[in-house]
Image: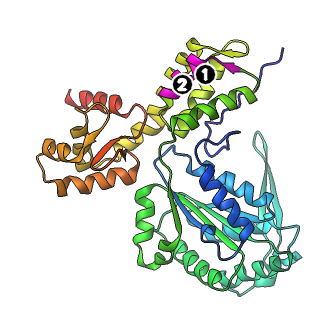
């Protein structure tokens, strides 16, 4: 009997067969692709800590846009982004664009696997600035009723191209163009973008913070993914896995992937679940927790330390007392850690850790630093 393909997708930006807990956001933006110009969800910014599924969500939404006839330009916020947008859009819309707007292959490389290099044939736009070139492309699409979706991953404000894009996009929206901008980034990077006066237009974008997913949604998505892949999971294993995942999308894919590989035959039992969880926790520590810990400021770490005596939920007032600071002082670090996705609100004046395994990880790091 041939081995069943593992249906879980812990790789960067891969879309899982079942997306847990994001249905409301996805449906709103899918509707926006149908509604077209004027729908506020066509300009949306996603924020969240590492591993909350930002890149995956952008990929899924771009796929959904293409299914509805839109063309897409999928880029990251890095130098060369503006030219990349034109090239990606030209390639995606090559079946609709005049010859002068099309992208063509300019190289073929063989390096263990075939690779294609694309060149944007912009011969009709010589001497035009970037806004004029993008407008020309949109003019080509307009008779077909086709829109352009730009997705920007790892959003940041520290370079001029982001400022130029925001300025041009604002004008295109005012003109009623069929265009959409979906962007995602770490909370502190998004905050910098929105606080940059040169990009202030984006403050009016719809915003979604990607946080913990309810256990019920995790449990359903985990079970459906396993069964769609051709295996079954015992109730005990499912509950144990759900508890270990603790609402974290990346952890769900890691746990699911490792449980699948640890199982024998077509059943994931408790032993396979425990083995998979152990492997996933190791990867979670190295891929997410270590990086997040290294980015904490002294004030952030002091706030986190002051939460450790509490089992699940901490009162902000208690945290301030343990820090030996005023509640106002503690509040600024509370806000920073909420933005980073390290902690989450648990009610009025209450917070708890958001990252699976974070408490034990921090305790171990502190013990190491004491030696």
| Residue 84 image offset from top left, x and y in percent | 67, 66
Q: Residue at x 79, y 82 (%)?
A: 139
Q: Is residue 103 visible?
A: yes
Mark with earlier residue (2, 1): 2
Image-quadrant location for residue 136:
bottom right
Q: Residue at x 60, y 18 (%)?
A: 235
Using the numbered discs, state the Cα–Cα distance from disc 2 to disc 1 in whole angstroms: 9 Å
- At mark 1, the secondary structure is helix
Q: Which mark is residue 259?
A: 1
Image-quadrant location for residue 38:
bottom right
Q: Is residue 135 left or right of residue 318?
A: right
Are the residues flagged by discs 2 and 1 in contact, CB closer than 8 Å? Answer: yes
Residue highlighted by disc 2: 241
**Where, quadrant-wise, is the N terminus in this rendering?**
top right
Q: Residue at x 61, y 78 (%)?
A: 169
Rendered image coloring scheme: rainbow
What segment is highlighted magenta in the picture?
A: 232-243
| Residue 118 image offset from top left, x and y in percent | 78, 62
Neighbor class of circle 1 (other Cα within 10 Å; few <14, some 14-19, many 20+) is many
């Amino acid at each position: 009997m041939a081995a069943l393909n593992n249906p879980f997708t812990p790789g960067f930006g891969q879309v899982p067969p079942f997306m847990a807990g994001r249905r409301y956001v996805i449906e709103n933006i899918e509707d926006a692709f149908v509604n077209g110009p004027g729908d506020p969800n066509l300009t949306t910014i996603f924020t969240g800590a590492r591993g909350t599924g930002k890149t995956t969500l952008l990929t899924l939404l771009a796929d959904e846009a293409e299914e509805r006839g839109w063309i897409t330009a999928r880029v990251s916020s890095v130098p060369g982004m503006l030219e990349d947008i034109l090239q990606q859009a030209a390639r995606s819309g090559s079946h609709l664009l005049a010859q002068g707007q099309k992208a063509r292959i300019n190289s073929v490389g063989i390096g263990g696997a075939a690779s294609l290099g694309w060149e944007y044939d912009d011969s009709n736009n010589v001497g035009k600035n970037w806004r004029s070139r993008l407008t020309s492309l949109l003019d080509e699409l307009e008779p077909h009723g086709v829109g352009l979706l730009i997705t920007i991953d790892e959003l940041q404000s520290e370079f001029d191209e982001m400022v130029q894009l925001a300025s041009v996009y604002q004008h295109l929206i005012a003109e009623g163009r069929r265009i959409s901008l979906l962007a995602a980034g770490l909370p502190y990077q998004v905050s910098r973008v929105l606080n940059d006066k040169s990009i202030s237009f984006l403050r009016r974008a719809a915003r979604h913070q990607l946080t913990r997913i309810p256990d019920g949604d995790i449990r359903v998505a985990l079970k459906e993914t396993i069964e769609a892949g051709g295996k079954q999971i015992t109730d005990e294993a499912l509950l144990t896995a759900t508890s270990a995942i603790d609402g974290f999308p990346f952890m769900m894919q890691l746990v699911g992937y490792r449980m699948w590989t640890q199982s024998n035959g077509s059943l994931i039992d408790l032993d396979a679940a425990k083995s998979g969880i152990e492997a996933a926790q190791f990867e979670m520590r190295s891929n997410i927790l270590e990086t997040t810990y290294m980015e904490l400021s002294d004030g952030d770490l002091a706030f986190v330390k002051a939460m450790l005596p509490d089992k699940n939920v901490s009162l902000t007032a208690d945290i301030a007392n343990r820090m030996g600071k005023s509640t106002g002082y503690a509040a600024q670090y509370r806000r920073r850690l909420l933005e980073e996705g390290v902690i989450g609100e648990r009610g009025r004046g209450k917070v708890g850790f958001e990252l699976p395994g974070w408490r034990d990880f921090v305790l171990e790091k502190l013990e190491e630093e004491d030696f």
